[in-house]
Image (tube, grey):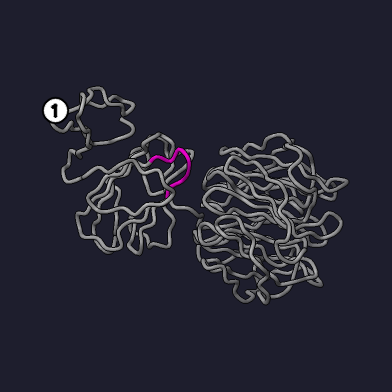
Amino acid sequence: MSGIVGSRLNIRGSGVVAKLGTDGQVLTSAGAGKTAVYEDLAGGISWQSVVTGSTMTAVAGNGYPINTTSNTCTITLPASASAGDEIIFTDYARNWATNKIIIDSNGLNYQGDADSFTVVYSTAGQSLHIVYADSTKGWIPINDDDVTDVPTKGNSQGIFVLGKTSGAVGMSNLVSSSGVIASDVSAVATARYGAAATQYGGDKGIVAYGSTGSVVSTSNLISNSGVVASDVSGVGTARENVAACSFGGDKGIVAYGITDAAASMSNLISSSGVVASDVSGVGTARYYLGACEYGDDTGIFAYGTTGSVVSMSNLVSNSGVVAADVTGVGTARSSVGACKYGFDKGIFAYGNGPVSTSNLVSNSGVVGTDVTGVGTARSQLKACEYGNDKGIFAYGYSSGNLSMSNLVSNAGVVASDVTGVGTARRDTGACSFN
């Protein structure tokens, strides 16, 4: 049964128990002048009025039909709880797949993870029944319908792949869940530079486009263990110096770049890693820009050059639609790196000059003012997520190719340089995987 799980509908004053159909609809009516209330079969749950707001605070012992027809809903759990406390949430309008619910565990653990994790439920018709166990495990789902585990945002590992030394190279370097870059893995993909990489499918990656000396449309899938697959050709217009990010939770987008001139086309990547044909007209044509995810399932492209450096940005919706230009987002520059951090925010850093400037992106896609002094100034580097909620910038160019990296905390703070992270190079691709 979808909708309300493990519940019955009592009709006050009627002496009748209403039955629910497979779509959650009441099959036995209350009759005139009667009031319907939900009563949980396990006992002790008091069902409340339908919630339609974007935020709510839950109370132990209650059940809540959550209607997300118009917006997502962030649910704050009680700040304190006792063993055996229960709460139920159910998808009133079967809309959680479009507008999900976000659980804020309010300082307590959720299925053993600290409150720093973002917990999202996004299955249409889903019901979530949680019980508080203890301070170690905190709230535990005892019935979460079609979901077998808590869907936490963020991937734990990353990869830097391809790049340029004196010419195109094809090696890759894995990033551990603690932000340590491993030694080179020899090339599987065709050596090239100026490609872009992004997550897809929730736990895998793809690197696409670039130049071997001539622009190509080649792509390579990356498994959830960081293995780069052989080339796939023919994925839209060949170009280089593109940017890419994920959107919608399990899909990706590659956009902009340069062929003979700056381009404004984009290509969507499905949840199974298939690159779609070109979509044109996605903001000002430019190249050498950066991109990252922000919020829960949206993305942003920013900076770059049209021949002259710019500071514009373009937001990407959770359906992969690129919005019009937004101007004035920090110092104009190109050849930046970007990644997500803190589950729902992003960071753009470094760039041509070279500079060490960074700019944080809020969970609503607003680019912040410049922050200076974040490691060695350089350009033509990339970045990816690691450790679920942190980031790493690596490689690049400053009077020569570099092999240094800089970790980004889950608060968006860039750490000092770490050296010796594989072959020095620039213009790599980078993404996370799980």
| Residue 71 belongs to the span the image colors magenta | yes
Q: Is 241 on the left-hand or right-hand side of 343?
A: right
- Amino acid carrying label 1: it is Ser
Residue depicted at x 17% and y 46%: 44
Residue depicted at x 56% and y 39%: 271
The outermost residue toward the left is 15
Rendered location of residue 351, percent (x, y): 75, 66
Q: Is 391 on the left-hand or right-hand side of 219?
A: left
Q: Nearer the viewer, residue 219 or 85?
A: 85
Q: Is 54 on the left-hand or right-hand side of 89?
A: right
Q: Label the magenta part by its dominant secondary structure.
A: loop
Rendered location of residue 404, percent (x, y): 67, 71
Q: Residues within 10 Å of mark 1 (few under 14, many from 20)?
A: some
| Residue 351 belongs to the span the image colors magenta | no
Q: Is 379 on the left-hand or right-hand side of 177?
A: right
Residue stretch in magenta:
67-74
Give residue 8's quadrant in the image. top left
- Disc tally is 1
Image quarter hosting the N terminus: top left
Residue 255 shows in this picture = yes
- Name the residue carrying label 1: 14
